[in-house]
Image (tube, rainbow, N blue to C red):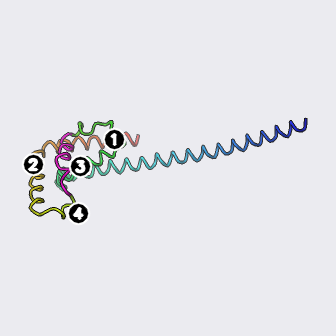
Amino acid sequence: MVLMWILLIVAILIIAGLSVYAGMLLTRLRSQNKAVRTAEGKRLHYLHESIETIAKAMQQEQCPLSEGCIRIAVLLDNMPQASSAGFPQRFPAIHDMYERIKHMPTHEARKDYPKKEIRKLDLEREGYEEEMSSAIQADIIEILVWVRAERAAQTS
């Protein structure tokens, strides 16, 4: 009979110990999930803010349309809902410009190209900017409306 009581007490101690451990793990998991949600919120805020800043700069002609299109297209591709949101269909001019010029060298890569080739590419890019200017400006307005709506949804 004493052996049964000892086994019962040991079993209760084991169950209590495992319960405490499970509680500690659950608390740690909740903390990690909260940290992940906070980080995702900050990342989303950064993406929205960056898209809005670039779009406004393009609208005010402080940023070349081609450069802005490249930057916005890449930022949109980094949005969590990028695969399901249909950004290329929602903002077709921006994505069309991006597709037309994404092969062109930028930054340090331009230094490796002959000047004649760079001038040719610049003229091509400027031609696209001129051709697509009004359509891109229309997409910029749509992007700004979308970003404001996304931010409002995020804060509520």
> Vertical placement of 9 versus 127: above or below?
above
Question: Between residues 125 and 155, which one lies in front from this camera angle?
Answer: 125
Q: In the rendered image, which residue does mark 3 sit on?
A: 55
| Residue depth check, mark 2 versus mark 1: number of the one nearer the observer | 2
Q: In the rendered image, which residue does mark 2 sit on?
A: 130
Amino acid type at circle 2 is: Glu
User: For numbered disc 2, what is the local secondary structure?
Assistant: helix
Q: In the rendered image, which residue does mark 4 sit on?
A: 108
Who's the residue at 20% across and 50% down the image?
A: 102
Asked if the residue at tag 3 contacts the one at tag 1, i.e. Cβ–Cβ closer than 8 Å, the answer is: no
User: For numbered disc 4, what is the local secondary structure?
Assistant: helix
- Mark 2 surroundings within 10 Å by alpha-carbon count, few (fewer than 14), some (14 through 19), many (20 or more): few
Classify residue 120 as left or right of residue 53: left
Part of the protein shown in magenta: 92-105
Q: In the rendered image, which residue does mark 1 sit on?
A: 150
Amino acid type at circle 4 is: Glu
- Counting labels gives 4
Q: Quadrant of the C terminus?
A: top left
Q: Position of residue 86 (x, y in %)?
A: 28, 36
